[in-house]
Image: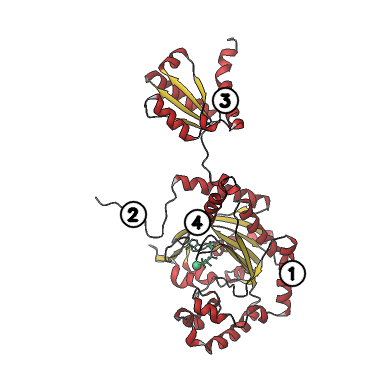
């Protein structure tokens, strides 16, 4: 029979990768916890209208990329393409906002029907934060610092923070008019995608990937010039806080985000390791969204980080610096002990011993091959364990064990001592204790 394959753009995470993901998630979880953000988990499936209303009909995500279908009750459902709309929906639905500002984080799979390539999948994963109920420029900087410091704690380098201000809806409307008339006068020079966007979503032309269009845009009017004095002052304040935090940034006047709900601060963190899919993390302020989704007017700011791209950058960092934090983070965790065992009685003993040792908190790999001792020792070495415990029928008969430090791990003295001590503790009490 023919083999079945996963769907295009849907990627398996094999154990070696899952281990790395868990290490990253553990760092993120602790980082968020220390900053007062609590985890929220929302369903993968939502009514289509949530995204149509929240993200905007004219965006690529809603227009071209959603996985939508009618369910058996004839409701239009969509696999979530991003996390923010769902988090806001949930906060409104459960009245969380009446309890004051909410600092929330989430993680998990998102679905977009895009052309798969390096750093771009159809099921991909994000970690994100949403801070609902704060409006200050300082909160924008605090949220950006949360992303920057997380990436720093993970040992990622070669990052650039780009920021822009999209101003208020009025600022954007004024700018949109300026931009459209400027571009209309140069319509023939635009790529066909951008020509189309001129009527549907002209601001998106600014982040067109087309080189000719980008060249043309060099002289286009900028959003920053169209900002009201108040919006400009707010943007200055955000930059002041970033400077005070010592976080380097570059103002990119052409940075607009793919989702319609952003205003004022927008930012992206890019990596020089990722080629065309350079953005690891993106976010900004979205003061209109809560109301748009049926809640009371509530300011908000947040970001989302792509796990697959983060892992690509981490692997590059680990390769560049094998002793650095990224390498330590992505390294596999070896067992404490490798149980070498051979012979009928020895194998029965080893099964019981492995269970006891695991119960005592040690990570124990029980060799199940029944192969010659030499072969088992090779595997023990390869496992990276600090110690091998050896049981043959002779040892089993005598009620003894051989503990052997494994050559490859002799330097792991702290780990090895703990492992040794636990085995000793476990084995000695019955002998040492006088029977009562
Ligand atoms: P891009 O411009 O690369 O399409 P985007 O603006 O659509 O990104 P966001 O909606 O802001 O992306 O999502 C935040 C992050 O999620 C991105 O910066 C990226 O790291 C990740 N991401 C988005 N789409 C994908 C995808 N299809 N595959 C893998 N990661 C993705
Ligand atoms: Mg996209």
Indicate which disc, 4 or 3, sits on the residue closer to the N terminus: 4
Kind of element beneath mark 2: loop
**Mark 1 sits on what residue?**
237
- Residue in front for this viewpoint, 114 or 339: 339
Label 4 – label 3 distance at C-alpha: 38 Å
Q: Which residue is mark 4?
A: 308
Q: Are marks 1 and 2 in contact (CB under 8 Å)?
A: no
- Residue toward you, 104 or 178: 178
The earlier-in-sequence mark between 4 and 2 is 2
For marks 1 and 4, the one nearer the N-term is 1
Dot 4 alpha-carbon crowd within 10 angstroms: few under 14, some 14 to 19, many 20 or more: some
Residue 54 higher or lower than 428, as above or below: below
**Cα distance in 3D space between marks 1 and 3:** 57 Å
- Whether residue 183 is visible to the viewer of this picture, yes or no, is yes
Label 3, secondary structure: give it: helix
Viewer-side label of 3, 2: 3
Decide: is 176 above or below 43. Answer: below
- Residue 298 visible somewhere in the drawing: no
Q: Which residue is mark 3?
A: 420
Residue 158 vs residue 258, the one in the foreground: 158
Which one is earlier in the sequence, the residue at label 1 or at label 2? 2
Quadrant containing the C terminus in the rendered view: top right
Is there a contact, CB below 8 Å, between mark 4 and mark 3? no
Residue 353 to residue 22: above or below: above
Q: Residue extending furthest bottom? A: 185
State left or right for residue 101 relative to residue 347: right
Q: Is 299 located above or below residue 377 in the figure?
A: below
Packing grade of label 3 (10 A; few <14, some 14-19, many >=20) is: many
**Residue at image coords 58%, 47%:** 26
- From the image, tell me which residue sits under label 2: 5
Residues under labels 4 and 2: Cα distance? 20 Å
Q: Quadrant of residue 294?
A: bottom right
């Amino acid at each position: 029979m023919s083999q079945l394959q996963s769907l295009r753009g849907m990627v398996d995470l094999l154990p070696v990768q899952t281990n790395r993901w868990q290490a990253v998630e553990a760092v993120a979880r602790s980082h968020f916890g220390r900053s007062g953000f609590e985890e929220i988990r929302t369903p993968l499936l939502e009514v289509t209208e949530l995204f149509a209303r929240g993200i905007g009909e004219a965006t690529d995500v809603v227009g071209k990329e959603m996985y939508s279908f009618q369910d058996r009750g004839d409701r239009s459902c969509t696999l979530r393409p991003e996390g923010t709309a769902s988090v806001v929906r949930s906060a409104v639905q459960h009245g969380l906002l009446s309890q004051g500002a909410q600092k929330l984080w989430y993680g998990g799979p998102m679905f977009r029907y895009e052309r798969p390539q390096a750093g771009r999948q159809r099921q991909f994963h994000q970690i994100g934060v949403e801070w609902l109920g704060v409006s200050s420029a300082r909160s924008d900087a605090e949220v950006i610092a949360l992303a920057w410091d997380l990436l720093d704690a993970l040992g990622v380098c070669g990052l650039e923070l780009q920021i822009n201000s999209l101003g208020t809806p009025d600022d954007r409307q004024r700018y949109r008019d300026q931009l459209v008339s400027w571009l209309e006068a140069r319509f023939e020079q635009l790529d066909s995608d951008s020509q189309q966007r001129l009527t549907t979503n002209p601001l998106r032309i600014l982040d067109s990937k087309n080189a000719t269009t980008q060249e043309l845009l060099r002289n286009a009017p900028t959003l920053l010039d169209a900002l009201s004095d108040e919006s400009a002052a707010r943007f200055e304040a955000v930059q002041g806080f970033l400077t005070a935090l010592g976080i380097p940034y570059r103002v990119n006047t052409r940075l607009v985000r793919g989702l319609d709900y952003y205003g004022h601060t927008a930012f992206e963190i890019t990596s020089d390791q990722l080629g065309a899919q350079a953005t690891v993390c993106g976010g900004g302020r979205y003061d209109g969204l809560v109301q748009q989704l049926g809640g009371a007017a509530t300011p908000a700011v947040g970001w989302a980080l792509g796990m697959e791209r983060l892992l690509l950058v981490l692997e590059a960092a680990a390769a560049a610096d094998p002793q650095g934090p990224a390498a330590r983070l992505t390294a596999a965790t070896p067992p404490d002990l490798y149980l070498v065992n051979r012979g009928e009685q020895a194998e029965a003993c080893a099964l019981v011993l492995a269970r006891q040792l695991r119960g005592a908190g040690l990570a124990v790999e029980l060799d199940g091959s029944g192969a010659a001792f030499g072969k088992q020792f090779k595997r023990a070495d390869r496992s990276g364990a600090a110690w091998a415990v050896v049981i043959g029928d002779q040892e089993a008969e005598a009620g003894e064990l051989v503990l052997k430090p494994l050559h490859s791990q002799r330097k792991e003295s702290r780990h090895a001592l703990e492992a040794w001590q636990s085995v000793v503790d476990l084995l000695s009490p019955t002998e040492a204790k006088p029977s009562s």
